[in-house]
Amino acid sequence: MNASLRVRRPSPALVLSAIALFFAIGGSAFAVGRHTAVAQPRCTDGAVKGFATVVGDPRAGIQNMPSSYSSSRRLFSARFDCAHAQVQVRRVGDAFQIRFNGIVGHAAVVSGVGNNPQPMTVSALPDGSFRVAPVHATDPHFELGPEHQFVIVVF
């Protein structure tokens, strides 16, 4: 019975792996602690200056969005402008124009969202707004529908 209670010495491999794990976790925690203590300046080059998830009015659908700029909360599921200005969107034909008032974005990316996300394109316009269009909008049988919801991120 004494033999079963005997404590075995850890192998050198176990000791070495425990030391490596300690330094890996400690180093990561140290690095995260140092970088989260300093907030990223808002509206600087390289920062996310704005984003919006455009879903359209739930009662009318994205295909019935107004042709004049609107900042109605019903048109967005989320939005952000680093200058705390309004984000506005409008429909122009089979495309959308979105502007982030108070910021000048140099680049943007867009992605379709929802149950059946569609591929979308984005291009900057001279007035500082962005044009977002479904890829298949040039097809003569194309119809804008609820599957053309999108998210845009401006840098």
Image (cartoon, grey):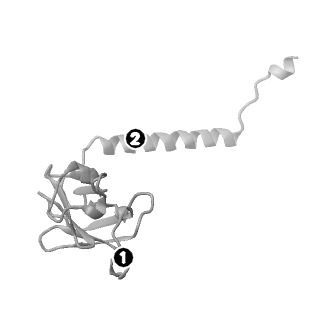
Marker disc for residue 71: none
Which residue is under mark 1? Answer: 142
- Callout 1 amino acid: Phe
The three-letter code of the residue at mark 2 reads Phe
Pointers 1 and 2 in contact (C-beta within 8 Å): no
Q: Residue furthest front?
A: 60
Q: Which residue is mark 2?
A: 30
- Residue that protrudes farthest toward the top in the picture: 1
Q: Is residue 15 rendered to the left or right of residue 75?
A: right
**Tag 2 or tag 1, which sits nearer the N-term?**
2
* 108 relative to 82, above or below: below
Q: Nearer the viewer, residue 23 or 155?
A: 155
Q: Is residue 10 left or right of residue 19?
A: right
Measuring from the top left, give residue 146's x and y in whole percent.
36, 61
Q: Considering the numbered disc 2 on the image, is that residue within a helix, a strand or a loop? A: helix
Separation (CA) of disc 1 from disc 2: 53 Å
Above-or-below relation of 75 to 134 = above
Residue 48 seen: no
- Viewer-nearest of discs 1 and 2: 1
